Amino acid sequence: MRSLKVVLCATLSLGVAACGDSTAPPMGSRQLAAQVQGKWAEKVSFPGISLVLNLAAQDTVLTGPGTYSIEAGRSGTLGITGVASGQMVKLDLSYDYGPRAHFEGSLQDQNTLSGLISYGPALPPGGTPFQITFQRKQVR
């Protein structure tokens, strides 16, 4: 049976990680939602820009408030609603002055949430998506 497993792994070697001997089940949606609870800040290198999410989880549903700051522009609050689905985190952000955004991403590690965000009136898909990364922040 071991040789059949080796043959199958060699045949399906297009990035299939399931050929190891691990019996750990994939992370469930509820577990993912619990893991993304907390405070997340956009990883940026420009002064005056910020996007902070404060996520709470109830089952697989994610909600919370957030804040933003635009360089040489306004700052304010936003509302967040979303869901953990499989390995993906899907969030809708509603800014206090009208715009909306849609984020879809995944945990890269326990302190990094990365994916694509798009802005626009018809969400999803919204406008052109761009890469965004959030780092977990410790609440004091």
Image (tube, grey):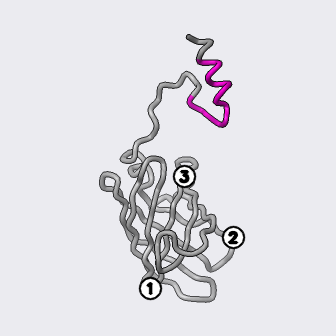
The circle drawn on residue 111 is 3
Q: Residue at x 48, y 82 (%)?
A: 99
Residue extending furthest toward the left:
58
Q: Is residue 27 left or right of residue 30?
A: right
Please state which amino acid type lies under the numbered disc 3: Asn
Crowdedness near tag 1: few (<14), some (14–19) or many (≥20) residues, C-alpha within 10 Å? few
The magenta region covers 5-18
Give the Cα distance between marks 3 and 2.
Answer: 18 Å
Q: Is residue 41 above or below residue 28?
A: below
Say above or below: 71 vs 91: below
Pick whichever, 127 or 132, lies toward us. Answer: 127
Residue 44 picture location, percent across and down:
64, 69
Using a 10 Å C-alpha cutoff, classify the residue at mark 3 as few (fewer than 14 neighbours), some (14 to 19) or many (20 or more). Answer: some
> Which residue corresponds to the image point at 36% horizontal and 47% vertical from the top-left?
30
Which comes sooner in the sequence, label 3 or label 2?
2
Disc 1 versus disc 3: nearer the observer: 1
Give the SS element for disc 3: loop
Name the residue furthest front.
11
Disc 1 from disc 2: Cα separation: 26 Å
N-term-proximal mark, 1 vs 3: 1
Magenta run includes residue 78: no
Q: Residues within 10 Å of mark 2 (few under 14, many from 20)?
A: few
> Badge 2 is on which residue?
45
Residue 37, by quadrant, is: bottom left
C-alpha distance separating marks 1 and 3: 30 Å
Question: Which dot, 1 or 2, sits closer to the camera?
Answer: 1
Under circle 2, the secondary element is: loop
Q: Which image quadrant: the N terminus? A: top right
